[in-house]
Amino acid sequence: MKERKIPLQRIFAMPHRTANKEPGGESQVEMIGSSKRFLDFRNELKTAAGWDTAPVLLVGERGSGKELAARAVHFWGPRARKVFYAISMPAVHHDLIADELFGHARNAFTGAADARSGAFVSADKGTLFLDEIADMRPSAQAALLRIIDTGEVKAIGADSPWRVDVRIVAATNQNLSRLVEQRLFRADLYDRLRFFEIHVPPLRDRMEDVPALCAYFLRQCCKSAGCALNKPATQACLPTSGNVDCAGERFYSKLMEYDWPGNVRELRLVVEGARARHLTGVLNETHLPELVGCDGNRSRIASADDLSLETAMRKHISLALRLNKCNISRTAVALGIPRSTLRQKMKKLGIRIM
C-alpha cells in the first residue's frame, strides 16, 4: 500500500511572522542624493531590479544603507506588490538558522507542537533579504545554494520539498572573496549570489549629498514632531535653496568636514539628536557633538600636512576597527592579517580600544 503523504499546504499552515506587504512603486523607497557616485549606484539598483529572479549581492559598510538598497531592488521591480521579507543573520542564533529559513513540520522535533513556515515560504513570490550573509553557517550556506539552484525548500521533518519563487537579495559588510580564500564562505554560493554585485558607496565617497541628506532628516524631525512643538522652526524648515533654514551654514559645513565612519545612519542620528536637544532656534556648529571613534581620537579626512604613512596606517586600522565594532578577530579578517599582527600594529601605533 502506498504511503499517504500529508499535503504541504497543511505542513506549512502556521504563519511564520508578519512581513512587509506594502504596495509597490518607487515612492516606497526614498533615496536622497544627486552626486555622480550616488546616481551611478542608483542606476545599478534599477538595472538589477528589472531582472526578476537574479540574486543580488549588496556590499557596503555599516550604516551605508544596504537594506534601503535591497528595498529599492524589490519595490522598483516586478515583485513590488509582493512580500519583502528581511532577516538579519547575526540576530538569529546559529542553531536556529535552519528553522528560521526553512521552517519545520509538526512534531519534527521535541516541542514542535505546531508546524511553522520558514522565511522562504513566507516570502514566496516576493523578495527575501538576507542581511550580513557572511555570518551564515556552512550548513545553512549549502542549503541556501540548493534552494537557489532548484527553487525547492524542505522544512525540518517534512517528507517532500516545497517549490518557492523567491528573489534573494543578500548583503554584507565583509570581503566575501577573501572569506572564500580562507574557506569561511562557499565559493559556489558566492558565485550564485553575485549575479549582480553592487557596492553601496560610503558617505565619504559622496560628500556632496550630505547637505541634502541633512535637510531631509531635519524635515522628518519637524514632521515627527507634528510641527507644533516649534512654530518658528517649522516655518523656517520650508525648503529654500535645497537646504532647510532651521540649520545655519556653519552647521552644514561642519558636517562636510567629518568622514562619517558610520555613514548615513550616523549622520541621521547626529542630525536628529541635535534637533531633538534644541527644538527652538537655528542649529549651528555648537549644537553638534564631538564625533569620536573607538580609539578615542576624532576621525576626520586627512589634511595636506598630515599624510605620513604611519598616520595613514593608524587611520586605516582605526576605521577598520570601527566598521567591525572593535572586534579584533573580524578586523583582522577584514584587513587580511593575523590577529597577532594586528595587535602588534595597534600597540606600535598607539591605538587603544576604549
Image (tube, rainbow, N blue to C red):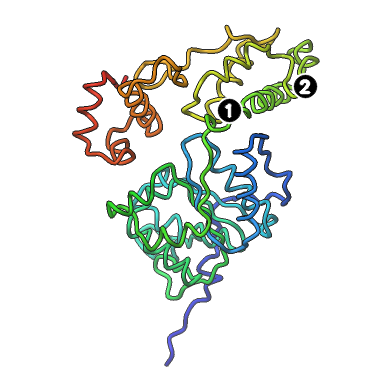
First reached walking from the N terminus: tag 2 or tag 1: 1
Residue 296 is left or right of residue 264, and the answer is left
Looking at the picture, does residue 253 appear above or below residue 214?
above
Distance CA(mark 2)–CA(mark 1):
18 Å
Residue 278 is left or right of residue 145, and the answer is right
* Residue located at (56% from left, 25% from top): 267
Residue assigned mark 1:
207
Rendering coords of residue 300 (x, y %): 46, 19
* Residue located at (61% from left, 26% from top): 210
Rendering coords of residue 144 (x, y %): 43, 62
Query: Identity of the amino acid at label 2?
Result: Ser
Residue 121 lies in quadrant: bottom right
Looking at the picture, does residue 31 appear above or below residue 185?
above
Query: Identity of the amino acid at label 1?
Result: Met
> Which SS class for mark 1?
helix
Depth order, front residue of 114/161? 161
Looking at the picture, does residue 225 appear above or below residue 134?
above
Q: Residues within 10 Å of mark 2 (few under 14, many from 20)?
A: few
Rendering coords of residue 140 (x, y %): 37, 58
Depth order, front residue of 246/223? 246
Rendering coords of residue 171 (x, y %): 48, 48
Residue 282 lies in quadrant: top right
> Which SS class for mark 2?
loop
Q: Which mark is residue 241?
A: 2
Looking at the picture, does residue 10 appear above or below residue 205?
below
Depth order, front residue of 72/112? 72
